[in-house]
Amino acid sequence: MKQMLQKGLALILALALCLPAYAAADQRVQKAVEEAGAYVCQMVPAPQVGSTGGEWAVLGLARSGYEVPESYYQDYYAVVEKTVKDGGGVLHEKKYTEYSRVIMALSAIGRDARDVAGYDLTKPLGDYDKTIWQGLNGPIWALLALDSRDYPMPVNKEAKTQATRQMYIDCILSRQLPDGGWSLLGGTASAPADSTSDPDITGMALQALAKYQDQPAVAAATQEGLACLSGQQDKAGDFSSFDAANVESCAQAIVALCELGISLEDERFVKDGHTLLDALLSYRVPGKGFRHLKNGSGNDQMASEQGLYALAALWRAGSGKNSLYRMDDVAAAEGAPAGSGLKDKHADVRPVPVTKPGTTFSDTQDHPARTAIEALAVRGIINGKGGGRFCPDESVTRAEFAAIVVRALGLPTAVRGTFTDVPAGAWYAPFVDTAAAYGIIKGTGGGRFSPDGTMTRQEAAVMVARAAKLCGMDTELDPAAVRDVLAQFTDYIKAPEWARSGLAFCYREKILDDSALEIGGTAVIQRWEIAQMLCRLLEQAALL
């Protein structure tokens, strides 16, 4: 029995030693993913086309398993479509890495880069001369982009030299430096005579070559590149570029090893007991993302985006999933830019598309409701108060609420003369009359609406519940269910009978935050609260 136990323990130990380093560090990686994902979402609530606040954020979030509303990617795609349309299919005249970066982000969210607003974004990468013009970044990212979803090599009839994948591979191999690594301009006439390799570019080159290890020349170059990278690693397991240790260099090395299927505990990459994961996490800001440099200088947003996708590479490797850049595991996204709604919704309720991409406000940059505010603003559902400000803590009038909720549901508007105190020529007349016609709002008695009156939290909850019913949601709660939901609040007995069902519904569906001790039903509701409530309603109703 003792021998069997010893053998069993030996087997368990042997299996444990065979696991890659990131498996043992699962908890560290998972916690860092959650913190960096939340920070990137906060910093980039509405991603644009760009190297910061754009594609790397989308890639890191999409490939890390961090959950974001589907509208996040739908809104990004709408921005890409608009950018492509406005530019006539041209993202940049010279920097073709712009195409590669967008292709990779689109692939990560299940979109086909060959048909964006009628344009094939892979086509420019069929032009060899223009793709390699900006240095080694060109062929590296062209390969990574085309291989992300195994896109066929695009035919570019306007190109002086039609590219092939092999040409890009050979270009990377031809520019390998004597020390085994790569640099941006190394191997070209523009490079200094004493060129030495850079860990960032070396890591990227290894990532691009990872898929072609069946070619002897590639396999040999890869081993030389790994030896060079190992030699550049310092005693803390870190890397320096331009004479400064930085998180981006560390991130690129991690992604390279993950793409090649190499454990972070490979003896070549453990220095004084420190692994690349240790080095990466040394830049981590607890509860947030990553610093560029350990002294806190530099662009922390870019550092966090690259840190996140390095963590995504580790998380995927430790979970047995496809690597970061091999995206044939991504399901195709729905073609529509917004959700189609629930099956029981009113026929007139429609998803609202993005019409004002990039809308943001100077006074909501650090606001907890920023994502909700901007999700509505980019669709024209809610507006600012002038001067680039949203004024999140201001109150909402009854007329303003009617306009916001009617826009949110995409309802057709018409002036009907429903209330005596709503002039037909007032800006809010079509919204108030429409909200009344669909049963979302009611008057205040005597045929009046009181458009300038402020909204309370309980009034807003009742009206949002009515809107939810139009959206096809089940808003009915029996008295016992209402009591069970509201009994958690110390002031629930103060809620009037007419408001209880609406409040209970909004709390049940997480449209209202139930973390407070009190309902505060008679408190004047603020603009940020209305934005958050309606954003959550649209998400629950599959309209965002």
Image (cartoon, helix red, strand yellow):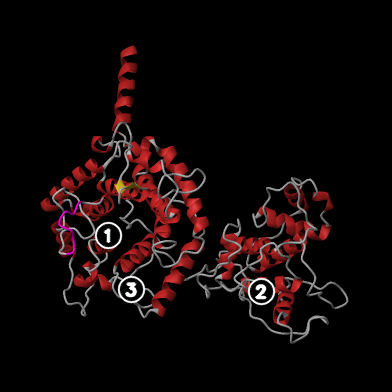
Question: Which residue bears the numbered disc 3?
Answer: 92
Q: Alpha-carbon neighbours of circle 2 within 10 Å: few (<14), some, or many (≥20)? A: many
The residue located at (30%, 61%) in the rendering is 149
Residue 525, relative to residue 356: is it above or below? above
- Sequence-first disc among 3 and 2: 3
- Sequence-first disc among 2 and 1: 1
Residue type, mark 1 in image: Leu
**In this picture, which residue range is highlighted in magenta?**
190-196
Q: Nearer the viewer, mark 2 or mark 1?
A: 1
- Location of residue 81 in the rendering, given as x and y in whole percent from the top left corner: 42, 74
Question: Which residue bears the numbered disc 1?
Answer: 144
Question: Which residue bears the numbered disc 2?
Answer: 406
Q: CA distance from mark 3 to mark 2?
A: 39 Å
The residue located at (73%, 79%) in the rendering is 433
Q: CA distance from mark 2 to mark 1?
A: 45 Å
Q: Nearer the viewer, residue 304 or 472?
A: 304
Residue 170, relative to residue 252: is it above or below? below
Is residue 191 on the magenta stretch? Answer: yes
- Sequence-first disc among 1 and 3: 3
